[in-house]
Amino acid sequence: MTTVRVLLALAAVNNWLLQQMDVSNTFLNGDLDEEIYMTLPQGYSELQGEVVPAGSVCKLQKSLYGLKQASRQWNQKLSQVLLEAGYVQSVADSSLFTRKHGASFVAALVYVDDILITGNDACLIDALKKFLSSKFQIKDLGELKFFLGLEVARSKQGLYICQRKYTLELLEEFGMLGCKPIATPMDVTQKLSLESGDILEDPTLFRKLIGKLIYLSITRPDICFSVNKLSQYMSQPRSAHLQAGMRVLRYLKNDPSQGLLYATDSDISLSAYCDADWAACPDSRRSVTGFCVFLGSSMVSWKAKKQVTISRSSSEAEYRSMA
């Protein structure tokens, strides 16, 4: 998702067009490079009006949904088509394809069947759309509004991305729509550990909650540390961990539409900030690293995680954080 945020930040600064396309029946477009056989579907004999010998199989000519190779074959097929159109695949992110022709620049970002197209040349963008339409059954969704669960709104100030719909659905799913909002996602005085509280009889609820919060942290760096902390107890969650997770939901109720603004008046200089909390983990005594990366005034990447090695001093923890 870092690539998505960087591309949106650049589009806001340079006032690029943002278009979206969706491929229909994605995995059916893949070409098979190997022989694959499957058992005959139910009702095949009656449909053909003949008796089919027992143990008969059919050879696949095209990829199908449910096939293990389906996603890989579709990725290869789409990559070949974009390379034929003169686009170059990024080394850093294989889902990003770019083309530069003189002063014109167009980028296509692919996530399975969703394609985000941006650039400064409307003619090249239209040409790419027509080329893709000639190769696949594809829908032109027009200006970017909703991409991979991200709600995108554009104004004179810039691009604003959030996950308001996802947040409200999350609160409703866990019965927290009517809860009392709270100002912070985690109690700083509470020291969670592996032994905090009683073991939950059914850990499914906690694991489901944390999984959804991890996806929400795509646009909410303010809950990144809390979610990282709670995700460490997925194997054997306890009552205190679940209560802390519910506190995060109360914090989200405070402002479900909070997100990130990528301003048009920002520059494109890259800057990063990092910090470390020495021996913060009460179970392993490992330090916690936190960092965020800005493209001008736009935050494009962030993370909170435990360090791999135990640091013997706060200075060592800071140096590991920088590294």
Image: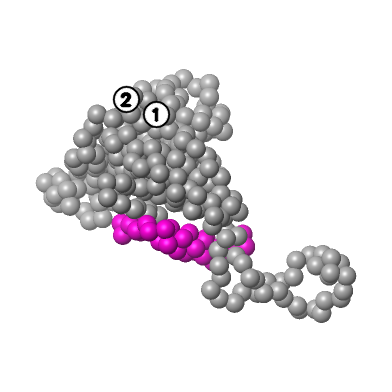
Q: Which residue is mark 1?
A: 154
Helix, strand or loop at disc 2? loop
Give yes or no for residue 65 being in the magenta stretch: yes
Q: Which residue is mark 2?
A: 157
Q: Amino acid at mark 2?
A: Gln
Residue 280: which quarter of the image?
Answer: top left
In this view of the protein, can residue 307 be seen by the observer?
Answer: yes
x 47%, y 42%: residue: 20
x 24%, y 45%: residue: 289
In this view of the protein, can residue 199 be seen by the observer?
Answer: no
x 38%, y 37%: residue: 17
Q: Most extreme residue toward the left, as rendered?
A: 315
Identify which residue, 83 or 195, lies in the foreground. Answer: 83
Identify which residue, 114 or 245, lies in the foreground. Answer: 114
Q: Percent position (x, y) of residue 125?
A: 42, 45
Identify which residue, 316 or 149, lies in the foreground. Answer: 149
x 44%, y 26%: residue: 256
Q: Percent position (x, y) of residue 264?
A: 28, 30
Placement of 179 over or under 23, stated as above or below: above
Q: Amino acid at mark 1?
A: Arg
Q: Percent position (x, y) of residue 1?
A: 38, 46
Total numbered badges shown on the rendered structure = 2
User: What is the magenta range?
Assistant: 64-93
Placement of 37 over or under 165, stated as above or below: below
Q: Percent position (x, y) of residue 287?
A: 23, 47
